[in-house]
Amino acid sequence: MNVCAADLHVHTALSPCADNEMTPPAIVAKAIAEGLAMIAVCDHNSARNAAAVQEAAGDGLTVLAGMEITSAEECHVVGLFPAASAAEAAGAELAGTLPTADAEYAAFFGEQLVLAADGAPAGEERAALAMATPLAIDEVVDLVHRHGGLAVAAHIDRRSFGVIGQLGLFPHEAGFDAVELSRHVAPGSEAAAAFREYGLPILHSSDSHYRDDIGAARTTLHVMASSFAELVLALHGADGRSIADA
């Protein structure tokens, strides 16, 4: 069994709130320097840069394609997908539900840069990614599952955009596969242990919008290889696989 350090919530310059220096080469270089074996690219309501980061990583780093989806209740849900094509298909469904980003939107929220593997500009996303989708939280989880993904309740320790902070309770019936704690909850702490009452695996992720934040929180995976399939097995505690606080 191998020990794999993973940061499963990293934004690129596609997210309007992320730094424009969050390019595929910069993300990959920082993740490797931090000793990570796996990251997940999770931009807001879109997966259009995930494949570029995968290409930039080559065989040096496992990059999962993901998204951070905003539900109608303004809860954030991280979707982790088996392939970039699955994430992009889910993202295409979301794009049709969002308004168009005009100049006023860009001035307020920021640019939404689609990038090539070398970091060069390849376009700009016109859907307003900072907006909430019209999908209820259970519909967001269903969308992720329909495309073969894992649905994670993002940064549930936060008052803003976490499911507990937004709803006042944890929605067990939504069907989440795991919950995520932010870098503000120390692994192994009493605060972290309190979230085990929801009966789901706990991931620690950085939610990094800036290069220096990559790897600031991480999860240790005990797996045979660094892959989506092995992550699924680890979340289920199958055949000796497991997850643990880093």
Image (spheres, rainbow, N blue to C red):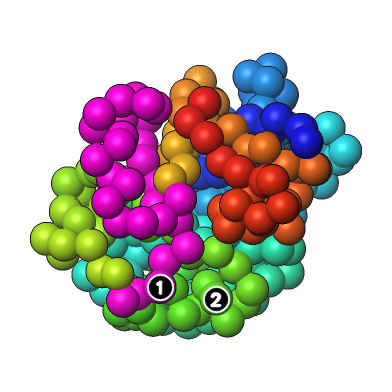
Q: How packed is label 1: few (under 14 Cα within 10 Å), some, or many (20 or more)?
A: some
Amino acid type, label 2 = His
In this rendering, the answer to whether 129 lies above or below 121 is below
In this rendering, the answer to whether 109 lies above or below 243 is below
**Residue occupying the far left of the picture:** 168
Residue designated by label 2 = 145
Please give the range of residues in magenta.
173-201
* Rendered image: mark on residue 175: 1
Question: Mark 2 and mark 1 in contact (Cβ < 8 Å)?
Answer: yes
Which marked residue is nearer to the observer: mark 1 or mark 2?
1
Side of 108 relative to 242 (left or right):
left
As helix, strand or loop, the secondary structure at mark 1 comes to: loop
x, y percent for residue 140: 41, 75
Quarter of the view holding residue 70: bottom left
**Residue occupying the far front of the picture:** 239
In this rendering, the answer to whether 243 lies above or below 100 is above
Q: Marks 1/2: CA distance? A: 9 Å
* Rendered image: mark on residue 104: none
Residue 12 visible in the displayed image: no
